[in-house]
Image (cartoon, grey):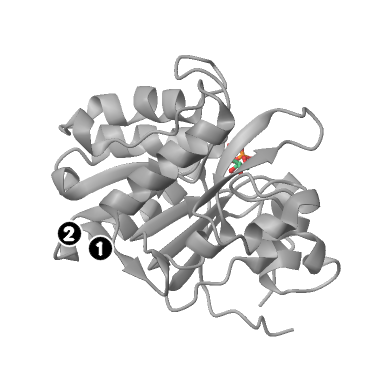
Amino acid sequence: MDSIVNYKIQISKSLEELSEKFAQLLIEKVNSSKNIFHLALSGGTTPKTIYEHLATHHQSTIIWDKVKFYWGDERCVAPNDAESNYKMAMESLLSELPISAGNIFRIKGEIDPYLAVDHYSSQVLQQIKIKNNYPRFDLIMLGVGEDGHTASIFPNQKELLHSKNISAIAVHPSSRQKRITLTGSVINNASNIVFIATGKNKSKIVDSIINQKDNYEDYPASFIRPIDGELYWLLDEHAASDYSD
Ligand code: 6PG
């Protein structure tokens, strides 16, 4: 079944190979960018190896001082909490790069969530040019959960896909943990959206989302369709094992 969304898919034999593919994509996009490159990082566990790969092998191949760093979502925890997406990215990548702290725009998970949304949304608005009525990130990196969530847009909060806001409060459906997430309106406005998924446990959801089949409409990641940007899926062979185009 043809997907109604145009996308580019790259399947790798290992997370190491996938990490290098992501690095090559960054090299292409960042180094050719005329201006500052606004990059939103993903949370979760998959990206950690990718960030470590970038820190180890790509200190000088990517023009890092062109990049301003953001997050697609953050848990409402302190920045030194083990659950913090900021902490994970700082330790595995950002602290290893020759970048200025002024180029890092973290979500303040430790403050009142309403204030965190206001603060993050105003920072994004201050830094990033508007196109199609929303700030246009150059690249947003996303994971996908087994329930089809992405960033922190969960199946029971699909209204966040079409929110007119830049960021919003979300609640994890099982842990009830509060999160701050970019909305689907902002994500779909990005120039490049890069999904990363690994592991057999993602294979069914990945096939359903990419090919818009089975219960794909239950899954928020199915509604990530760039308005006029590029959509990439970087998969390992386990996550791609049910996928066929
Ligand atoms: C988070 C992420 C979340 C993650 C998916 C996939 O804060 O946890 O934003 O959307 O990308 O849950 O996580 P894994 O890559 O760890 O499977």
Numbered mark located on residue 218 in the image = none
Q: Left or right: 1 with respect to 66?
A: right
Which of 43 and 75 lies nearest the eye of the viewer? 75
Question: Which residue is denoted by mark 2 in the rendering?
Answer: 31
Which of 204 and 229 lies nearest the eye of the viewer? 229
Residue 60 drawn above or below residue 79:
below
- How far apart are labels 2 and 1 at the CA level? 6 Å
Residue displayed at 19% across by 64% down: 33
Q: Amino acid at mark 1?
A: Glu
Q: Are marks 2 and 1 in contact (CB under 8 Å)?
A: yes
Q: Where in the image, quadrant-wise, is ligand 1 located?
A: top right
Identify the image quadrant of the N terminus.
bottom right
Disc 1 Cβ-to-ligand 1 distance below 8 Å: no
Which residue reaches farthest right? Answer: 214
Q: Amino acid at mark 2?
A: Asn
Question: Which residue is denoted by mark 1 in the rendering?
Answer: 28
